[in-house]
Amino acid sequence: MSRVLLCGAAIVTLSMGIRHGFGLWLQPITLDRGWTRETFALALAVQNLAWGVAGPFAGMLADRFGAFRVLIVGSVLYAGGLVLMALATSGLGFTGSAGLLLGMAQAGTTYAVVYGVIARNVAAEKRSWAMGVAAAAGSFGQFLMVPVESWLIGGFGWQNALFLLGCCALAIVPLAAGLREPKGLAAAGGSQQSIGAALREAFAYPSFRLLMAGYFVCGFQVVFIGVHLPSYLKDHGLTPGVATTALALIGLFNVFGTYAAGSLGQRLAKRHILAAIYLLRSVAIVAFISLPLTPMSVYVFASVMGVLWLSTVPPTNALVAQIFGVKYMSMLSGFVFLSHQIGSFLGVWLGGRLYDMTGSYDIVWWIAVALGVFAALVNLPVRETAIVRPAPAAA
């Protein structure tokens, strides 16, 4: 178990840490290339959508053939996408690299694939905690990589910074060896349920659809804030250093939030944890946009949002395993995450679109508030008991 957790945590640290700082590239790339913010935002919106669409397929392959091969391919795609992102000179090329390639890479190197291995190798009574540990590692990666990426951009230029990050992404290849599973374990699961039957069962189950609805909101909120917060702060006269510190604080406090959510999931109803997280996000956003904007108010907001940032991940994925079992854990988590990424697409794209139309992010902030209340309400009816399947007929 320790090997799986250590290597899985390190992989998530790299994959989530690199992407968390993409908002730092918005200003230098758009100024250098002469693009609008919508051009940059559309590429990252496509990235999130591609990540979501590819997620179920990456999960399906990981469940069937093991996570090791999927992680290798994902690592190579990640490195290639970062290099081509630096070389792109047109909006279409930028969308293809920063959007399509990096989205597919993230599908093969992040939570759905790693959590499937954890679910199969950790006892059920420790599963939520173990997922919290992996999510906390991803959060630490966000805290660690944001100042590193800011330093790389300042010291080497935005293009060379992307080349160096591509080298970092290749470190996932040796780490993937720690997630090798005995042949056949990934495809095992106790029942003889087919992939098609598993999908029909999940989508017919109301609680699965409710989890997807809540995760849609999670994606909208965190990706809008992660990508557009640096520009929002600069528009209000704050220095780039404030944005860098804010993103780093989100990552730092997310370490505590995700670990706490995973640990609490062992003792409290996970639906209540999720409802509280979404509601508190809305409260934090209302306070942030209503109070005077100062560096201190930004740091307080970033710290609070950090606690709530990825804390939805352990209870959501633990619920999928708890309700449906671990055989198709990566695939079903991938479908839930697809909903998350549709929300991410809308959050990042609408941020750029509405800013270019109105010269302000105000409308998108209030959409994020309303969606948080909606997500809190839809998570309350989720049933957490394992689904009851008819026993196979006797021979």
Image (spheres, helix red, strand yellow):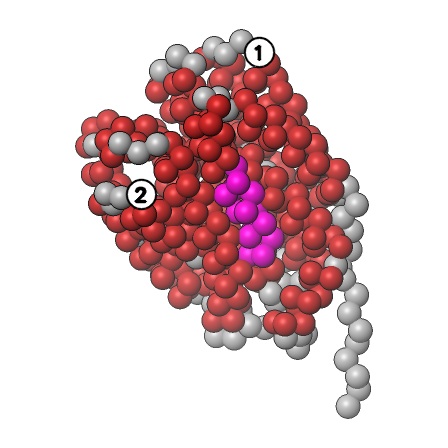
Residue at image point 39% right, 43% down: 43
One can see residue 20 in this view: yes
Residue at image point 49% right, 17% down: 298
| Circle on res. 291 | 1
Q: Determine if the magenta segment contains residue 146.
A: no
Residue in front for this viewpoint, 279 or 374: 374
Q: In this view, does 97 lie to the left or right of 205?
A: left
Q: Is residue 107 above or below residue 226?
A: below
Question: SS of the residue at dot 2?
Answer: helix
Q: In this view, does 109 lie to the left or right of 263?
A: left
* Image: magenta residue range: 334-348
Instruction: Give how far across and how far down residue 370 sits, in percent.
Output: 66, 30
Instruction: Identify residue type, mark 1.
Output: Leu
* Residue density around tag 1, few if under 14, some if 14–19, many if 20 or more, within 10 Å: few
Q: How many marks?
A: 2
Instruction: Identify residue type, mark 2.
Output: Gly
